[in-house]
Amino acid sequence: MAAFLQRFLGPGRFLSDPPPSDPFQTPPVPGGGRAGVLLVNLGTPSAPDAPAIRRFLAEFLADPRVVELPRALWMPILHGAVLPLRPRRLRAKYAGIWMSEGSPLLVHSRRQADAVQAELAARGHDVTVALAMRYGEPGVAAGIRQLREAGCRRILVAPQYPQYSASTTATVVDCVAAYAGRLRDQPELRFIQRFYDDRGYIAAVAHRVREAWSRQGRGQKLIMSFHGLPKRSVELGEPYFAECMQTGRLLAEALHLAPEQYVVTFQSRFGAAEWLQPYTEPTVVALAAQGIKTLDVVCPGFTADCLETLEEIAQENERAFTAAGGEALRHVPALNDDPAWIGALSSMLERHLQGWETRLARTPGGEA
């Protein structure tokens, strides 16, 4: 039966690894192998135009982890209303933040990956770092292939989401596991689930805030704006809200802020359901109405600047604030490739790589 199925279906139909050219030649048994790191962020359209945005949204919003509605209800809405209309509305928003090198999220993420690769090498680690986007390109499969082609048999997957959510971190785990499930020779895998309270991460965000204050002055209040999540997700058991609030408390402590000097809010609502509150834009409008003239907004949940920080916060919320009577709302840049963050991220990766051989081989004379 197996021979019949193999002849009928052809080689490689069940599993993605190609068969060896001569299956009767015994290859050498591989050792532990090199270690690799896969940095994963959410993703971005490949261009600031409607077709590219539509392709990105079609993949992103079709993920059942992202939109938790029955497929029979959601898919007609997605393809009948959202995808025909929303990409056209988003064109100008993406065009307004697009960099000469491409999407800000992808540009900053690439710089992060390159900087972490260099930092780990400077610390004496023989580790390959690859970048992947959960939606769009470069995809997770491409990132894993890059690491395997570099000889990595052990892979640390590092989603760039400080606070855990099923719609972000868990879907990365799903995607990696689904790809590994198609491999005959699977790599050894580890995952970083969360780092909302990591000391280096908190210190790096605080450093970005202090840099902004030294450059443009200090506002009357600091808004800590996190990406929103449907309230029902938390009611069903997600720790996201608690982790965001703990990040806010730790950041306030690092900046020596009193409770009245900052507020934690949530942005980027989508759909009609109730999301985590307080919402960011209504909060900045209310603060302007109360006589607050200057606000600083930091987005600790985003490790790289993107549409949600550069357009929604720095442009939309700034307009809403000034229209309500405020004078200046200043966006604090995301961590991006700031050296403080690269050092903190590299230290985090070092801790999670422990037990795997990563040190560069050294010659008898002591040199690498």
Image (spheres, rainbow, N blue to C red):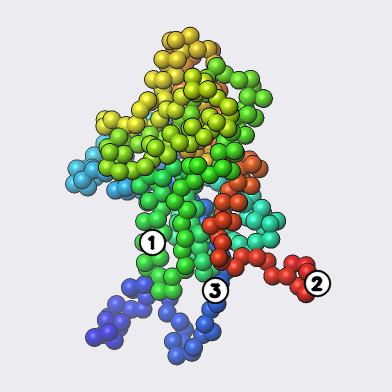
Give the labeled residue for mark 3.
32
Q: Which residue lies furthest to the right in this view?
A: 365
Amino acid type shown at disc 2: Gly
In what element is the residue under mark 2? Answer: loop
Q: In which quarter of the image is the N terminus?
A: bottom left
Placement of 23 over or under 118, stated as above or below: below
Q: What is the C-alpha distance between the residues marked 1 and 3?
A: 20 Å
Give the labeled residue for mark 1.
177
- At 55% from the left edge and 77% from the top edge, which residue is drawn? 31
Residue 16 position by quadrant: bottom left
In what element is the residue under mark 3? Answer: loop
- At 53% from the left edge and 44% from the top edge, which residue is drawn? 198
Placement of 170 over or under 270, stated as above or below: below
Placement of 94 over or under 195, stated as above or below: above
Crowd band around label 3 with a 10 angstrom C-alpha radius: few (<14), some (14–19), many (20+): few
Q: In which quarter of the image is the C terminus?
A: bottom right
Q: How many labels does the image show?
A: 3
Give the labeled residue for mark 2.
365
